[in-house]
Amino acid sequence: MGKRIKKLKNVRLHREGTNTLIYAAAAFVAVGLLLWLLVPNEVVFYVYAAIAAVVYLIMVNFFRCPIRYFNGETDGIVVAPADGRIVVIEEVEEDKYFHDKRIMVSIFMSLFNVHANWFPVDGKVISVHHQNGNFHKAWLPKASEENEHADVLIETDNGEQILCRQVAGAVARRIVTYAKDGEDCYIDEHMGFIKFGSRVDVYLPLGTEVCVKMGQATTGDQTVIAKLK
């Protein structure tokens, strides 16, 4: 599908985290000042400062926005749409879009993972749909259907249709999807972002060669999770 234009950029913080990090820093500083002024025991302040620093660094890590490029040909390749760990590899009945059996590969993202999401394949976005729902723990099987989620349906140049589903978790309450109906999409491009613990499901045609195992760690836009038939 056309040559992808790549520009070298450094890792930066994701724009979705700007307000959160600013407000969190202000809150930590305000509480710290109150402790310093009102609590005579300095140990309390230093313990708070250490805990606040650790929590803030975890948040900064969470909102990192690494710019990655997949090395190699992308035809027929399905890359991990997220950093995390494989929690589901199974054949399921998909009744919403395909009305047939599909191979579902799910990646769970913990609080310590980068939460940017990438397009898993090169192709064209057929549809984008957001569905409100519950907030079960993201690794539970029912989370894929019952939790709030956003679906991105993609068709590759070879006519294969791939469904990528961003699923909210017990903590995650905001799914951001950048994909737009009718747009061309490419591996290396950000598809969206999910704030805090969550998962991403990829529905693949039967006959697809799955290249990952249960429990395997994945790196978004780098780990090949499958090869299309």
Image (cartoon, rainbow, N blue to C red):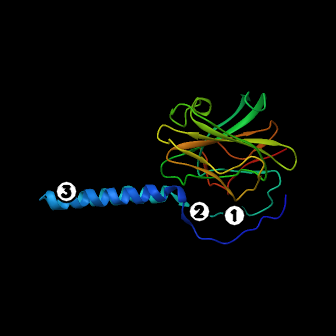
Mark found first going from the N terminus, 3 or 2: 3
The amino acid type of the residue labelled 3 equals: Val
Horizontally, is 137 left or right of 100 in the view?
left
Q: Which mark is residue 66?
A: 2
- Residue 93 pos. (x, y %): 73, 27
Q: Nearer the viewer, residue 128 or 206?
A: 128
Q: Which mark is residue 44?
A: 3
Q: Nearer the viewer, residue 42 or 30?
A: 30
CA distance for labels 3 and 1: 46 Å
Position of 132 relative to 220 (above/below):
above
- Residue 46 pos. (x, y %): 23, 61
Image quadrant assignment for residue 15: bottom right
The amino acid type of the residue labelled 2 equals: Pro
Q: Secondary structure at mark 3?
A: helix
Q: Secondary structure at mark 1?
A: loop
Label 2 crowd bin: few (<14), some (14–19), many (20+), radius 10 Å: some
Q: Which mark is residue 69?
A: 1
For the point 82% across and 48% down, which residue is it? 156
Placement of the N terminus among the 4 image quadrants: bottom right
Image quadrant assignment for residue 148: top right
For the point 81% across and 60% down, which residue is it? 73
The amino acid type of the residue labelled 1 equals: Tyr
